[in-house]
Amino acid sequence: MAHHLKKATLLGLPPELRLHIYNHIFGPIVPWITLHIHKHVYCLDSPTYLIGQGNGSLSILRTSRHLYEEAAAYLYESTEISICLRAPLARAWSDSSRSLGHIEDVRFWPFVTHCTLTIELRGQMDAVVVLERLGRLLEALGHGKHLRELKVVLSCRDDDAVPECFENIVDTVSTLRISGKARVGFTDSFGEEGEFEKRVCDQIMAAMSA
């Protein structure tokens, strides 16, 4: 007697079992990833940047939007994403290294829930470049709508003056809207924070929680 077995599918499995399968495919997850944005960003579509052993890529799950989003959320939700927006010192930087991906091309932004954003401040900064790059990054992050925890660090070396575009940077960062926890810090090379810095941090915090 012929038995007609229904073909098993990944979607047909219980969600808890699928998570175990994702862990087997992609390997142990590293709890953090650091991006340095000084020109453009590599188009990071593979979790190999996050894992220790596996060589899996999310592209193998693109046949199903549900599986792709479920796996991406599993991989990135518990991952601390540390982003350092490097201070551009020349406008020419924005036109270099076209082989790198653009900020908005990185596919995991909607799944990022825990993020540390460090913004380098230098006296001689190209305001056009830094504000354009910061705006693109915040737009890619959905202006914080997916974030459960955010730490913003304004980093300034003691031998650098505050850039002329500083107020514009503060106004741009203040467009973030976080429903979860948010912290804002202002550090120099000695890790100190004065009255001016505290006022700036309070201003950003008040705007983000409005």
Image (spheres, rainbow, N blue to C red):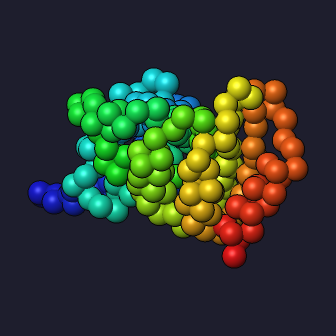
Position of the C terminus, as image quadrant, is: bottom right
Q: In the displayed orientation, state which residue is furthest to the bottom.
A: 210
Q: Nearer the viewer, residue 158 or 26?
A: 158
Identify the residue shown where x is 54% and y is 34%. 124
Decide: is 183 above or below 27: below
Q: Nearer the viewer, residue 92 or 106?
A: 92
Decide: is 25 above or below 189: below
Q: How many marks?
A: 0
Q: In the displayed orientation, state which residue is furthest to the left.
A: 2
Residue 31 appearing in the image = no
**Residue 85 located left or right of residue 105:** right
Q: Position of residue 32 (x, y in %)?
A: 58, 35
Identify the residue shown where x is 23% and y is 34%. 98
Residue 185 appearing in the image = yes
Quarter of the image where one finds residue 53: top left
Identify the residue shown where x is 70% and y is 61%. 204
Identify the residue shown where x is 75% and y is 56%. 200
Q: Position of residue 48 (x, y in %)?
A: 40, 30
**Residue 102 located left or right of residue 188:** left
Q: In the displayed orientation, state which residue is furthest to the right.
A: 195
Q: In the displayed orientation, state which residue is furthest to the top.
A: 53
Q: Position of residue 83 (x, y in %)?
A: 54, 40
Q: Position of residue 165 (x, y in %)?
A: 56, 50
Q: Nearer the viewer, residue 144 or 127?
A: 127
Position of the N terminus, as image quadrant, is: bottom left
**Residue 137 located left or right of residue 99:** right
Decide: is 175 above or below 102: below
